Image: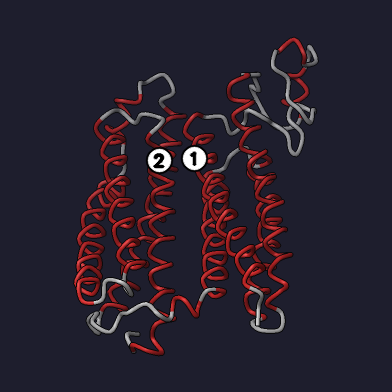
Amino acid sequence: MIPSQQATRFRRLGVLTIFAVYCVILAGGIVRASGAGMGCPDWPTCFGQWVPPTQESQLPVNYHEIYAARGYQNTAFNPVKTWTEYANRLVGVTIGFLIFLTAWTSRIYLRTDKVIFFLAITAFVLVGFQGWLGSAVVASNLKPLMITLHMLLALFIVALLIYAISRSQKSLLADIETSSLPQNFALVLKVAVCMTLLQVAMGTQVRESIDFISHQDSLVGREFWRESFPIIFYVHRSFSAVILFTNMWLAWQIYQQAVLAPSKSRLLMRMAVVLLGLIVTAILAGVSLDRLGFPAIAQPIHLLMANLIFGAQFFIFICLHYSVKKNAVI
């Protein structure tokens, strides 16, 4: 039997870590949208310093030649971009500490549920690998494929953490009432999760296309980029409607279940509302990108919403998984 105080500490620390991972995703989106990815051309230091400079005069006179020799052509110090990237790295370091504490506190489950411990340890190892991958992103001079892998790994780490924390609360999740949900609910939910991942994959392709357009047409305003968009952009845009209606169906089924058993369906109902809110926000951010000339602020919001949608869907699926023993939904 796990002491309730220790279980609560693990749950709260795990939730905080998940929140911090999403902050890293948001920070990474801001870095990418602002073009600050090479604000620090080296890693783990920034312009050779652990705390980056605030003025170009604090750098060697020949720093352009130094970094050109390392393969980074046209390196120019920009204090805003440098400190944006540096802040992103600090958030990443914070994740390292939090995930270590989460893994450490998960040892209380070694006797009762070793899977929770190994999930937390795996997430800790992957965060370390994510840090290395971040350095590889910088070393690759921000190759789009490396950036995409960096983002997808963050998504996988979130999934591991959500599952670990949910598994530690499986006795509570088992009380969720799902008996009135239709038999095909779980199947539709799985399809919805797959559609979200497909949409994220298409979004990365769109993002890579935009990066290419921005470099090719660097002198052209953002409002004119739309003229060069590939066909996948329009597929990505139209597919959002399919995702919206699919998740609306899921939310409606959860609402009907909540009407019959409000006290035991409250958590699912809240997640359904959150899920729809995230999807609508993602679509609005996408519309602003399409119609308002790709404002930089909308790009990280759009990316964050996509990751949060996956997290919400995954958590609903876990809730169903742990209620199946009683309600036989899946």
User: Residue 219's image quarter?
Assistant: top left
Q: Please determine whether, in this image, residue 116 is positioned above or below residue 153.
A: below
* Residue type pointed to by label 1: Gly
Mark linked to residue 39: none
Determine the residue positioned at 37% across, 35% down. 298
Report the quarter where the N terminus lies. Answer: bottom right
Mark 2 or mark 1: which comes first in sequence? 1
Determine the residue positioned at 28% across, 74% down. 188
User: Residue 140's image quarter?
Assistant: top right
Q: Which residue is mark 2?
A: 301
Are the residues flagged by discs 2 and 1 in contact, CB closer than 8 Å? Answer: yes
Tally of marks? 2
Q: Which residue is mark 1?
A: 29
Q: Residues within 10 Å of mark 1 (few under 14, many from 20)?
A: many
Residue nearer the viewer, 85 or 109: 109
Task: State the separation of the CA atoms marked 2 and 1.
Answer: 8 Å
Q: Is residue 196 left or right of residue 31?
A: left
What is the x, y in percent for residue 177? 32, 79
* Residue type pointed to by label 2: Ile
Q: Is residue 301 left or right of residue 103?
A: left
Residue nearer the viewer, 291 or 164: 164
Q: Secondary structure at mark 2?
A: helix
What is the x, y in percent for residue 38? 62, 31
Residue nearer the viewer, 129 or 324: 324
